Amino acid sequence: MNFLEIQCSVRGKTLPADHGYALYSAIKHICKEQQPLLLDNNNLSSEILLSSIPGVPDKNGLVYLNNKSRFRFRCPAEQATQWYRFLQNQVFDIRGHLIRLVQPRLTLPETSNVLKARLVTFRLEKWNSQEAPFHFLESCQKALERIEVNGQAFIDSNYQGDLALRAIKIREKNVLGYGVVVEGLNEDDSLKLQGLGLGGRKHFGCGWFYPAKEEINAA
């Protein structure tokens, strides 16, 4: 499957730090009002991936937007023109925080033999601090096999050197997952993983992979 990424600069001041579900809800709401044909059974297509919008965290549940803050959206190439037009200059209300998307650009994701995702989630039968990493990595490798991607998955570490255990709030439920690194990818598998993502909740910013050097360049 060929896919493209739409990137938009973001005009606004702040966003909730955990805004993945709210961003998805805002896009779906405006689609229903303005472009219902973009939806699949009143929902975003399962082939669409959304990234959360980066900013400067204030450690109190907000991020401050700056000139590096980007809205990023991946979709099949044949849908890209329609979404590009829809997203241009669109205003979203994210839990009371208004943002405008400007200067949209179409791009191809960059290949890399090492990809990272800030948060990947799976529905594990049991979740405890001792067994969860083992079952989580098992789920990662099985998911890579299902999409026929050859690579080795690892749980990422946070700035303190601990396992990067993270959460996303969906309605009133906190869903746990980990930051993930996948190494040993060839060019085709690198693009495939970025286009398909990994795990669940991919409309909410989960399973979004990017070249590891993006993180270095942003630092």
Image (cartoon, rainbow, N blue to C red):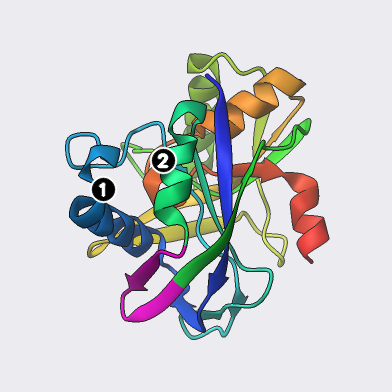
Classify 188 as above or below 61: above
Q: At 40% across and 38% down in the image, what residue appears?
A: 122
* Residue type at the position of mark 1: Gln
Q: Where is residue 83 in the image (x, y as percent from the top left)?
A: 42, 44
Find disc 2 in the rendering and name its residue: 82
Find disc 1 in the rendering and name its residue: 35
Q: What's the magenta region?
A: 89-99
Q: Residue 73 carries which label?
A: none
Is the residue marked by circle 1 packed among few (<14), some (14-19), or many (20+) residues within 10 Å?
some
In the picture, measured across the screen, residue 14 lies left or right of residue 204, that is right
Q: Where is residue 110 in the image (x, y as percent from the top left)?
A: 74, 37
Instruction: Give me the C-alpha separation between circle 1 and circle 2.
Output: 10 Å
Q: Main secondary structure of the magenta part?
A: strand
**Callout count:** 2
Q: Does the magenta stretch include residue 174?
A: no
Q: Position of residue 3 (x, y in %)?
A: 55, 29
